[in-house]
Amino acid sequence: MFYICSMLSYTEENYLKALLKLSFQNEDKPEAGTNEMAAYLGVKPATATDMLKKLKEKELVTYKKYGKILLTETGKQNGIAILRKHRLWETFLYEKLDFSWDEVHEVAEQLEHIQSAKLVDKLEEFLNFPEFDPHGDPIPKANGEIPSIDKVLLSELKEDELCKVVAVKDTSTVFLQYLEKLSITIGTAIKVLERIDFDGSLSIQIADEEPRNVSMKFAESLFVKR
Amino acid sequence: MFYICSMLSYTEENYLKALLKLSFQNEDKPEAGTNEMAAYLGVKPATATDMLKKLKEKELVTYKKYGKILLTETGKQNGIAILRKHRLWETFLYEKLDFSWDEVHEVAEQLEHIQSAKLVDKLEEFLNFPEFDPHGDPIPKANGEIPSIDKVLLSELKEDELCKVVAVKDTSTVFLQYLEKLSITIGTAIKVLERIDFDGSLSIQIADEEPRNVSMKFAESLFVKR
DNA sequence: TATATTTGTTAGACTAATCTAACTTTTATA
DNA sequence: TATAAAAGTTAGATTAGTCTAACAAATATA
């Protein structure tokens, strides 16, 4: 039962991670299409086709011509290992090196490809076995387990409900910087004061501040816990 | 006066670093030959020739057919920037993640290629602006300056001289593990008790321990300060 | 100094990852 | 259901880094 193969290229690792992320996005059916993959990775569909054939050869994905792509168990475990590294490095950058919320991703994209089992495990220990990264996403354990947490979108709450921010759904720089401007971070308390049916926007109270209105798009980008 | 170009490939960076290291080795004339480079990098001479042409195009080295290779000022500054990253990461691994003396190099070889000016500077700050890495080698500053230190080889000392270990010349695993076995680390005090002319070996006292004999090869692999 | 040895270069080929352009299959829709 | 649109594939080319084998230049040595 040894799933993690270390002889993957930088690029192969990225394809596996992309596939894993896409499978999280479409929870019900964790498959992806060639164009979807290509768009996600910023390459042309032709390129993705070639790579997918290669990953199939290595038994990391199941795939046949014109069909959907699915990770095999081995492919999934390898993807999870990369995600684990990514999120541990993000946590390191944020907590130890004072990187801001929106700066960590880009550097972690590079760091996640460093090959050293010892490094990952020591880093995890150094960070005190964190369960969630700076964006609130769960950090897979060494055995591949992924911590889970109850969370709903802010947009799902009813009037007068109280909650705490647990994660961001949208990790774009522009959204993260907006959150920073609003002093919203993981753990911030929010109360829904009013729901505006007209456009789906919400009037909310952030911590103890003055009420403020946020758009439906905003409310659909933030995960909270009731 | 901006020397550091960030558009260097992983491989190009390695060639620059190798050239820099070779130039330290032959202090008097900091040039290198094609075969020397190739051997150092573990590639064939033909490969090195191609790469050197490319580096010449980019004005990182001066080089002409059948001639010696020399770093330009830009090439040197880029090499120093990589060395800086390498040694800072080694320090991080050793001090914060409990890696041993002989484990840090391999992982730092990978980490040194991460591209992020902010990361390097923040890491340096996090480590409290160390001047020397775990092997006692100087860590270049952000401006390219390299801290210097008085050091001589243990083999140069006379009988009855006292010294402290400041760096290792040989960083091979087998030597580092031997040092660990002898409880020698940076800062350890050593007294030369006797020089054996026959084979250049020394009788030394390490800290407060019992006298012990070490070979000439050993004494020529350790840097100390009187 | 003539020749052998060492050092370095060139030419041609390979692999991984990418592209474009043309083609094929699947799916959606009129 | 016929056809247009979307999705996916193939073929052929490109680039970076590497190799081997054959060759050329420089250096060492008899």
Image (cartoon, coloured by chain):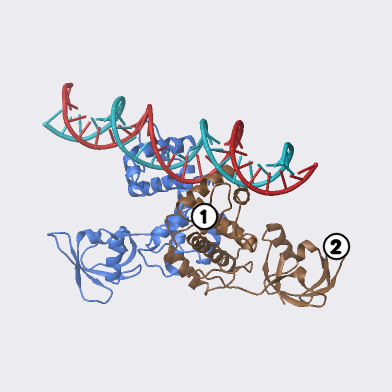
Chain colours: A brown, B blue, C red, D cyan
Under circle 2, the secondary element is loop
**C9 over B6 or under it: above or below:** above
Image location of residue B138, percent across then percent down? 42, 58
Q: Amino acid at mark 1?
A: Thr
Separation of disc 2 and disc 1 at Cα? 43 Å
Classed neighbour count for the residue bearing mark 2: other residues with Cα under 10 Å, few (<14), some (14–19), many (≥20): few
Quadrant including the N terminus of chain A = bottom left
> Is the residue at mark 2 from the same chain as the one at mark 1?
yes
Q: The residue marked by circle 2 belongs to what chain? A: A
**Residues marked 2 and 1 touching at CB (< 8 Å):** no
Callout 1 secondary element: strand
Quarter of the rendering containing residue B36: top left
For residue D4, above or below residue B24: above
To which residue does mark 2 refer?
Answer: A199
Any mark on residue A62, and which?
1
Residue A149 picture quarter:
bottom right
Residues B187 and A93: in front is A93
The C terminus of chain A sits in image quarter: bottom right
Which amino acid, mark 2? Asp
Residue D27 in the image: state x and y as whole percent: 25, 33
Asked if one can make out residue A43 in the rendered structure from this viewpoint, the answer is no
Left or right relative to A4: residue B194:
left
Residue B215: % across, % down: 19, 62
Q: Which residue is depicted at the point 76% across and 78% down? A: A162
Density class for disc 1 (Cα within 10 Å; few <14, some 14-19, many ≥20) is some
